[in-house]
Amino acid sequence: MIRINVLNHISDYGIQELQKKGCEVGFDVPNPHGILVRSADMLRMDFNEELLCISRAGAGYNNIPTERCAQEGIVVFNAPGANAEAVKELALCELVLAGRDVIGSIDWVKTLAGEDPDRIGDI
């Protein structure tokens, strides 16, 4: 059975797909063959001898000691674009926040708590 240690929360869908293929997947899986990571700092992490690969759920490798992995024969790969939807959502949110005083509007609405509902329509 292939053992995969997960260092950060990964989509339940992805975990279930691996489990359907007979993999043992979870946090603190002993002596894993693979590691799934998003943002955990692995730079000082000790690797077991059975470790074959590290998969970064996202772009980049700044949290993985790639040179040491290469020396130890551990394959490292990533999934660029996997978080593209979330990045688009955040960019759109930032555009709205920059273009309108959303936070100020929320604060103003909070000041109306306890006001007469008929009077609020006149404001």
Image: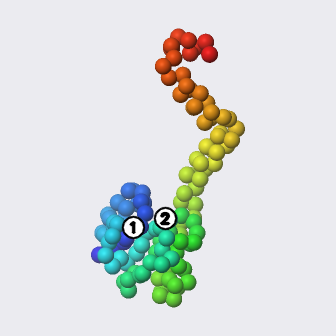
Question: Where 100 falls versus 61 (above or below)?
Answer: above
Residue 21 in view in this figure: no
Amino acid type, label 1 = Val
Q: Which residue is mark 2?
A: 38
Q: Are marks 2 and 1 in contact (CB under 8 Å)?
A: no
Q: Classify 10 Å Cα crowding around label 2: few (below 14), some (14-19), many (20 and above).
A: some
Q: Residue furthest right?
A: 99
Q: Secondary structure at mark 2?
A: loop
107 or 71, nearer to the observer: 107
Residue corresponding to mark 1: 6
Rendering coords of residue 35 (x, y %): 42, 72
- Picture coordinates of residue 58, whole percent (x, y): 53, 64
Judging from the image, the colouring scheme is: rainbow
What residue is drawn where x is 34% and y is 66%? 26
**As rendered, which of 78 and 7 lies closer to the eye?**
7
Residue at 59% of width from left, 27% of height from top? Answer: 108
Q: Is residue 22 left or right of residue 54?
A: left
The picture places residue 1, in percent across and down from the top left corner, at 29, 75
> Which element carries disc 1, helix, strand or loop?
strand
Q: Nearer the viewer, residue 100 or 15?
A: 100
Q: Label 2 vs label 1: CA separation? A: 9 Å
Crowding at dot 1, Cα within 10 Å, few <14 / some 14-19 / many 20+, comes out as: many
Check disc 2 and give the amino acid type: Arg
Between discs 2 and 1, the one toward the N terminus: 1
Above or below for 95 versus 58: above
Name the residue located 38 percent from the left edge and 56 percent from the top edge.
Answer: 12
Residue 108 visible here: yes
Q: Position of residue 111 (x, y in %)?
A: 55, 25
- The circle drawn on residue 98 is none
On screen, residue 113 versus residue 2, left or right, reads: right
Q: Which residue sits at x=64%, y=45%?
A: 94
